[in-house]
Amino acid sequence: MMPRALAGLAVILMVTVGGAMAAPDFAALNIQPYDPPKPAPAFSLPDLEGKPRSLADLHGKVVMVFFWTTW
């Protein structure tokens, strides 16, 4: 049992260490460059009470906007 466990550990070490030493092939991964976030455009929507709320009213706060539709 012990030799089998050691053999399994050796295989795991070879796979993890060997994979960590190989340089990643970024071209094959088709990685896109990161574009920094852009400010949201100014807009206004009605709140739950029907009053218009603009994004500027919520400046400095975390805002989560959900859009949905039915087709």
Image (cartoon, helix red, strand yellow):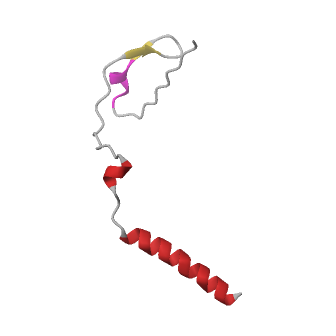
Give me the residue at 42% from left, 73% from top: 18
Give 19 or 57, whichever is nearer the viewer: 19
Magenta region, main secondary structure: helix
Residue range highlighted in magenta = 54-59
Q: Residue 44 in the image: x percent, y percent?
A: 38, 15
- Quadrant in which the C terminus appears: top right
Please give the name of the residue rendered at 55% of the width and 77% of the height, measured from the top-left corner.
11
Q: Percent position (x, y) of residue 48?
A: 53, 16
Residue 69 as seen in the image, left or right of residue 35: right
For image coordinates 30% across by 36% down, the residue present is: 37
Of 18 and 46, the residue lying toward us: 18
Nearer to me, 45 or 9: 9
Instruction: Say whether residue 48 is left or right of residue 55.
Output: right
Q: Residue furthest front?
A: 28
Compared with 55, 28 (above or below) is below
Q: Residue at x 39, y 33 (%)?
A: 61
Picture layout, residue 4 above or below residue 30: below
Q: Which is nearer the eye, 20 or 53?
A: 20
Quadrant for residue 38, please give it: top left
Q: Does residue 4 show up magenta in the picture? A: no
Q: Which residue is most to the bottom?
A: 2
Residue furthest to the right in view is 1
Name the image quarter holding the N terminus: bottom right
Q: Is residue 23 above or below residue 31?
A: below
How many marks the image carries: the answer is 0
Please say if 27 is above or below 46: below
